[in-house]
Image (cartoon, rainbow, N blue to C red):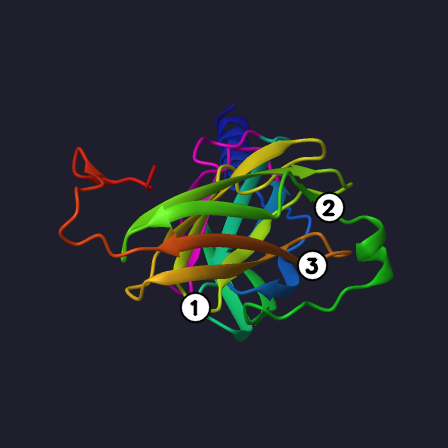
């Protein structure tokens, strides 16, 4: 009986030693290809726990501060799926890049390394576009291409709003909306517009110090690969009204009536 008890204990110990979680990633590397500078490129590495114990990710460490990782925080049960997501900020980083994520989890190997690479092209440059990309592209439709801002004081700001709609097949993303004079800033209500979805593009313009009539051309670049650049025009009349009645209301600059 004692021999059987020892054998049973050894079997239980052996079974416990073999019971463990296990990573099974669909892929452990990704190529973003060309990215227009300013875009935050993201990719999800999906995996299945093919072991027989819950898998817990303790930490994901990026190889640089330009990458923000995200991962499934709760335990992943055997047979269930989890993700590790990498988001790369390309702003101010033109050129080729190759980065990695180190995933620490309760798996036998301890750490798992995921890699990604790509090439950031400068703003105002058009990426290499294939016929397949054109065929399945987003399509940017905009409600107007010109806006009159009226009369502005030197240094005063005004905001023009454009309604942007995606009439294509793929999600629409705005890469940039800027002017050569650097007198404008922009914002989009949603970073990605699905097919048929609309959003608001806001262009904020700061009037120059010199009075006179001004025309500002805004170049919008997007994932519409059949029309990568869209031109918008903003016009205004800058007038110096020093000594006249103020056009300031509640501390905020407002356009002339």
User: From the viewer's perspective, is the residue at label 2 or at label 1 nearer?
Assistant: 1
| Quarter of the figure with the C terminus | top left
- Which SS type dominates the magenta stretch? loop
Residue 226: x and y in percent read: 78, 56
Instruction: Say above or below: 77 vs 247.
Output: above
Asked where in the image residue 58 lies, by quadrant, the reply is: top left
Q: Which residues are magenta?
A: 48-77
Residue that numbered label 3 is attached to: 228
SS under mark 1: loop
N-terminal-most mark, 3 or 1: 1
Q: CA distance from mark 3 to mark 1?
A: 21 Å
Label 2 Cα neighbours within 10 Å, binned few <14 / some 14-19 / many ≥20: many
Which residue is most to the front?
A: 244
Q: Are marks 3 and 1 in contact (CB under 8 Å)?
A: no
Is residue 211 covered in magenta? no
SS under mark 3: loop
N-terminal-most mark, 2 or 1: 2
Label 1 Cα neighbours within 10 Å, binned few <14 / some 14-19 / many ≥20: few
What's the residue at 71%, 52% (across, down)?
224
Residue that numbered label 1 is attached to: 181
User: From the viewer's perspective, is the residue at label 3 or at label 1 nearer?
Assistant: 1
Relative to the observer, which residue lies in front, 221 or 60? Answer: 221
What's the residue at 64%, 59% (across, down)?
30
Query: How many numbered dots are placed on residues in this image?
Result: 3
The numbered mark at residue 138 is: 2
């Amino acid at each position: 009986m004692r021999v059987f008890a020892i054998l049973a204990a050894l079997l239980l110990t052996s079974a416990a030693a073999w019971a463990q979680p296990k990573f099974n990633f669909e892929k452990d590397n990704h190529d973003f290809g060309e990215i227009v500078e300013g875009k935050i490129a993201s990719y999800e590495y999906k995996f299945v726990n093919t072991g027989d114990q819950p898998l817990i990710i303790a930490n994901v460490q990026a190889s640089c501060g330009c990458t923000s990782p995200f991962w499934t925080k709760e335990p992943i049960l055997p047979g269930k799926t989890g993700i590790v997501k990498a988001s790369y900020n390309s702003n101010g980083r033109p050129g080729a890049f190759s980065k990695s994520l180190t995933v620490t989890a309760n798996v036998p190997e301890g750490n798992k390394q995921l890699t990604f690479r790509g090439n950031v092209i400068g703003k105002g440059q058009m990426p290499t576009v294939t016929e397949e990309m054109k065929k399945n592209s987003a399509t940017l439709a905009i409600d107007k291409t010109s806006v009159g801002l009226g009369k502005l004081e030197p240094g005063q700001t005004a905001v023009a709003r454009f309604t942007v709609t995606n009439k294509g097949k793929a999600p629409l993303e705005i890469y940039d909306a800027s002017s050569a004079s650097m007198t404008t800033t922009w914002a989009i209500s949603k970073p990605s517009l699905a097919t048929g979805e609309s959003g608001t593009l806001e262009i904020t313009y700061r009037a120059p110090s010199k009075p006179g009539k001004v025309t500002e051309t805004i170049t919008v670049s997007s994932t519409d690969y059949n029309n990568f650049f869209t031109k918008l025009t903003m016009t205004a009349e800058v007038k110096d009204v020093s000594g006249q009645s103020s056009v300031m209301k509640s501390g905020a600059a407002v356009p002339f009536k």
